[in-house]
Image (tube, grey):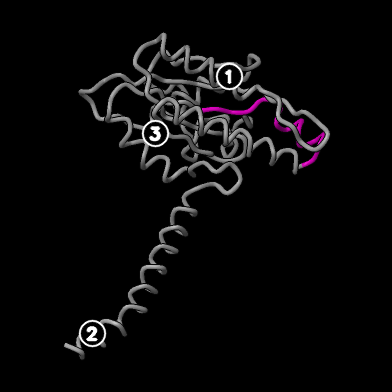
Amino acid sequence: MSQTLTMLAAAAPLAAGWSLHSLRLRRQVEKARHDPLSGLLTRKPFEERAKRTLVGGPRAVVVIDLNGFKQVNDVYGHAAGDAVIEATGQRLKRWSLDHGGIAARLGGDEFAAVVSVYSLADLRWAMDGLGEALREPMEFEDHYLSVGFSAGVIWHQSHSSVPDLSQLMRCADEVMYGVKQTGGGWMAASSATPAYRTVNGRRDGRRGTSGEAA
C-alpha cells in the first residue's frame, strides 16, 4: 500500500505538468485561430465554424469593407489604422454575438460574419444596428476617427439544401463591391448565384486578380 502511495505521489507532479502543458497548447492553438489585431477569427477557422452554423437555420452571410480606411492611414499613420481595425473587431464581435453568430477578419479592412436572421425585418434591424456601431467615431490620441462601411448580405433560408459557404460569400462580396462604388451602406443580394467570373479563386476585379483593385 505504501509503495502504491509513493508511486502516486511521484506521478502527481508529472500529471500536473502534463495538464499545464496541454492547457498552454490549447491556448496557443486557439490564439493562432484569431487575428491578433482585431481579436476576430481568421478566415480558415471562420469558414469551418460558419459551415456548421449555416445548417442550423436561417442565416445571413455578410461581407464588410471599411470606407475611408486608407485615408485614416494616410493622414494619421498606421498606428491609427490599427486602432480602427481593433475597434472594428470589437464592435463586430459584439454585434455578431448579439445576433447568435460569428465574425472574422478576412484581411486588411475586410471582414465577414454569419448571424441568425429570421425575417427581412430582422435583417434590416440587424444591419442598421451594425452600421450605427461601425460608424461611431473612435478616439485615437487627440483625434476622433470615423470610417464608413460597405456590406453585402445574402440571406440563406433553405433547410433542404446543404449551403455552399464559398458561393454565398462570393455573392455577398459582389453586392458589397457594388455598394462601395455608390458610396457605402448595405444591400442584400437578390440571387444566390454569383454574377462575376472567378480569377485566382477571387471575384474578378479584386486585389489578386488581373482586373481593377477593389
Disc 2 versus disc 1: distance between alpha carbons? 63 Å
Q: Amino acid at mark 2?
A: Leu
Count the marks: how many? 3
Quadrant location, the C terminus:
top right
Q: Position of residue 200 (x, y in %)?
A: 49, 40
Residue designated by label 1: 131
Residue designated by label 3: 166
Q: Amino acid at mark 3?
A: Ser
Q: Which tag is nearer the camera, tag 3 or tag 2?
A: 2
Given the current orientation, which residue lies at the most extreme front position?
2
Looking at the image, tell me whether mark 3 or mark 1 is earlier in sequence order. Answer: 1
Would residue 191 appear left or right of 74 to someone viewing this image? left
Disc 3 versus disc 2: distance between alpha carbons? 57 Å
Q: Which residues are magenta?
A: 63-77
Q: Position of residue 11 (x, y in %)?
A: 30, 81
Q: Which tag is nearer the camera, tag 2 or tag 1?
A: 2
Q: Quadrant of residue 179?
A: top right
